[in-house]
Amino acid sequence: MAREQGTGSTPLLVLGKVTEILNCFSLEEPDPTLAQIARQTGLPTSTCQRLVQNMVREGFLDRDGDRYRIGLRLVQWASPGTFGLDIVRIVRPILQQLRDDTGETACLYIRDGAFRTVVAVAETRHVVMRPFRVGQVMPIHAGAPGKIFLAFDPGAREALAGMELTRFTPNTPASWDVLDEQVEQARGQGFFAAFGERNSDVGSISAPVFDHTGELAGVLGLGFPTQRVTIADVGRLGPAVSEAARAASVALGQHTAAAPPKAGRSRGAAAR
């Protein structure tokens, strides 16, 4: 569509306006109203409404009441892009092997600010499962993967320092003292297990993946329902996750004799 209907010969760069609308969606503001979109883009209300309605119809956006979210169809289109990431291509077979060895869903995460995103999944074959999907975004202070980011990536602490530690369940760390204790444990043992921190019936065990420079490249881990995997299973699954993460690090070029970097601030220097 090169021109806006009903405006004569005035050209309309539709893709540019669609981009402006999509730029209104962020992790901080995932579900703006039409009025907010119109205000942020500066588009005339009628033009904004027509474009948003068309984007809903085509699956770019989903509508819930008077609010809009990025559409599932757009997420599906974006997912194949992760196949071009070297880390995803290299680590995917290791995720699949970890899934086969443990029977649980294996995931690879990368960090974006104070959030972590799933970029690859090897899904469990159990009927009872908790879904993890490529593109799923979660906060780094809740769940095992985030503790690994905070332990081995100084940028993670900096990104989280000014944010509130939202409490999702009674097990979510709600203070820096508790969070720092968890981070020190993750740094000391090389993996971390969390139960019911983001959802009361979901647990996770994660370990760091390093690249050829020794920097944290991502976090590899298992996700599972707590009705099947309990704290008693950590002694069995924790080393399996650590070994898979080491294999992923070697595959990314890390020297096998290199010691993991001791990133992060000391507890006494933690932001509160």
Image (cartoon, rainbow, N blue to C red):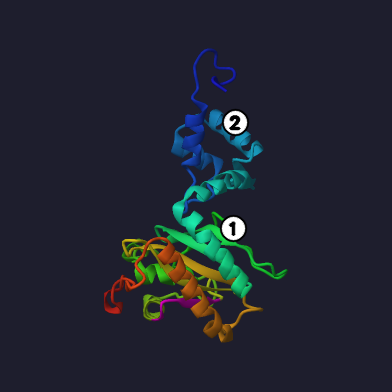
The quadrant in which the N terminus is found is: top right
Residue at the spot 60% in from the left edge and 82% down from the top edge: 230
From the viewer's side, name the closer residue of 271 and 107.
Answer: 107
The answer to if 142 sits in the magenta stretch is no
Q: Which mark is residue 235?
A: none
Residues at badges 2 and 1 in contact (C-beta under 8 Å)? no
Q: Horizontal and vertical percent for residue 54?
A: 62, 33
Disc 1 designates what residue?
133
Pick the quarter of the image with the C terminus. bottom left
Q: Which mark is residue 50?
A: 2
Apparent side of residue 158 relative to residue 121 in the rendered image (left or right) = left
Task: Name the residue: 49% across, 48% down.
Answer: 84
Q: Would residue 45 appear left or right of 186 to someone viewing this image? A: right
Residue reaching furthest to the bottom? 232
- Secondary structure of the residue carrying tag 2 is helix
Amino acid under label 2? Arg
> Which three-letter amino acid code belongs to the residue tagged 1?
Arg
Nearest the camera: 217 or 164? Answer: 217
Q: Secondary structure at mark 1?
A: loop
Question: Relative to residue 109, is residue 123 drawn left or right?
Answer: right
Q: Which residues are magenta?
A: 189-195
Q: Quadrant of residue 213?
A: bottom left
